Structure formats: C-alpha cells, structure tokens
Image: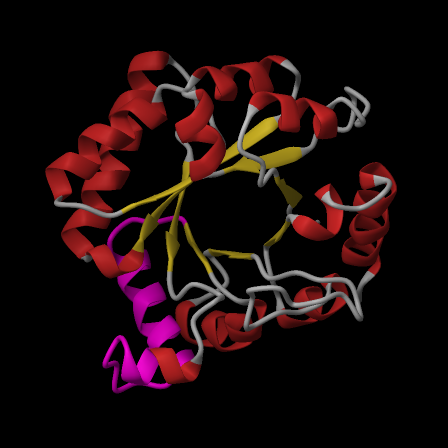
Amino acid sequence: MRGPLIVSLDVWNWEGLVKIIDKFPTNEEMTVKIGMELFYGEGPAIVQNLLDRGFKVFLDLKLQDIPNTVKMGMMQIGRMGVTYTTVHALGGSAMIAAAKEGLELGSEEAGVPTPKLLAVTELTSITEDALENEQNCKLDMVDQVVSLAKLAKRSGADGVITSPLEVSSLKQQVGDDFLYVTPGIRPANFPKDDQSRTATPKQAAEYGSSALVVGRPIIRAEDPVAAYHKLLKEWHDAN
C-alpha cells in the first residue's frame, strides 16, 4: 500500500488554516504538513490543535545547525506527537545522528511514537545550474541527491525529501528500506510555480515514491476536498 498524500498547508495564520481544514470531513485521516510560516506565526499550539482534530502532522522545519542545537530542538519536536519532521542532509552526519537521538529522547519522555526523520537532499527549486554555479557542487543533480541520501541513511534518518525525478536512482542505489517523500507534485498541465523538478501523482508512483506532498494544487483549488480526492485517486490507482 502506498503512503499518504500529504497536504501542505502553506498558509501563515490560524484563520487561513481553518478555511481549508474545516472543509474536510473529520474521518479523512489525512496527513497535513505545516512549515515555517505557520509554525513561526502560531507556535507549537497549532500542532496540538491539528492532532486534536484527527490529523497526522508532518512538521517541516528543516533544521540545520550544530549537532547539539539540533538535538535539543528535536527533543522538543519529539514530544509533540508529530509523524514526520525534517533536517537538511547538508548539515552532515553528526547533525543527522543528533537529530535522531533528540527525537527518540523527546518522544520516549512524552510516551508517543518517535517521528520519522526525513532529510532534505536538494530543494526542488534548485536547478542544475544553481547546483553547479551557486553551491559549487561537482556532482550532477542525481549523483548529489544519491550521495546525500546515502549519508542520511548511514546517519540514522528514516528517509529523504527528494524530487520524484530522482527516486528511481535512489531506490536502486540506497535501497527499498527507506522512505522517499516527494514534493513538487502537480496535476497534468498545472503551473510549476517555483518548483523546477515536478511530476504528476501517477508519474511519482511509477518512479517509486513512498509518499507525496501537495500544496497549492489542493489548497488554492476552488474545491480543495475534490482536488485532494482526485489526486489521491490518481496516486492510489497508478500501476
């Protein structure tokens, strides 16, 4: 069975959030993602509110700092009861290992399951040109993403956030026992916006994605619930 189609709630305050989530039936058992703008604006209470409403939560803060600082931050996240959270793989092996340790300590203290730790490889907004000329990386995009995914796996992460276009190579070189969570998902003919490496749900399934993250095509739709179910059906029905 494929993993969830995670709805990215890219809004910046509680009022904007309620306009979206109140449209969904309480029995949807959806996983939703909240990121920096909403978390920094509303604070940790927003997580508990979503959990109380029956949602699973992906808290996407993409931590990157020295290992001890990340460990202490992840202890706080581990206590919250979220399902997924993120670090940047570019933070290095010691930082990723410290993040996992912090999550385990925090969740054990709170008596909740340990969140899955996902490492961001290269952002889906990064182009080959930016990789070469801004990050000064000598590898091409696929090799860079594979290298970062291997590092993340060795360091204790449960999976990576990656473009669907790299998943086939990742599964071959990193393995099937790892999560490949893919943003940059768009319906056919939908604008790419600021995403450079995109795919449809069907294409992502064919590439081997473990779970999808979809934001604007759902939350900006005239009928977000219908948009969600249409994409979910395409995701589940793909061969």
Is any atom of residue 101 visible in this view?
A: yes
Residue 206, image x, y percentages: 70, 71
Query: In the image, 71: left or right of 134?
Result: left
Which quadrant, please, contains the C terminus? Answer: bottom right
Q: Quarter of the image holding residue 80?
A: top left
Q: What is the magenta range?
A: 131-158
Query: Residue at the spot x=39%, y=66% of the render?
Result: 122
In depth, the one of 196 and 51 nearer the eye is: 196
Q: Is residue 138 magenta?
A: yes
Residue 196, image x, y percentages: 54, 72
Q: Quarter of the image holding residue 66?
A: top left
Query: Residue at the spot x=60%, y=37% of the render?
Result: 9
Whether 84 is drawn above or below 209: the answer is above
Main SS of the magenta part reads helix
Query: Residue at the spot x=82%, y=23% of the render?
Result: 25
Whether 20 is drawn above or below 93: the answer is above
In depth, the one of 145 and 19 nearer the eye is: 19
Residue 146, image x, y percentages: 38, 73
Query: In the image, 19: left or right of 128?
Result: right
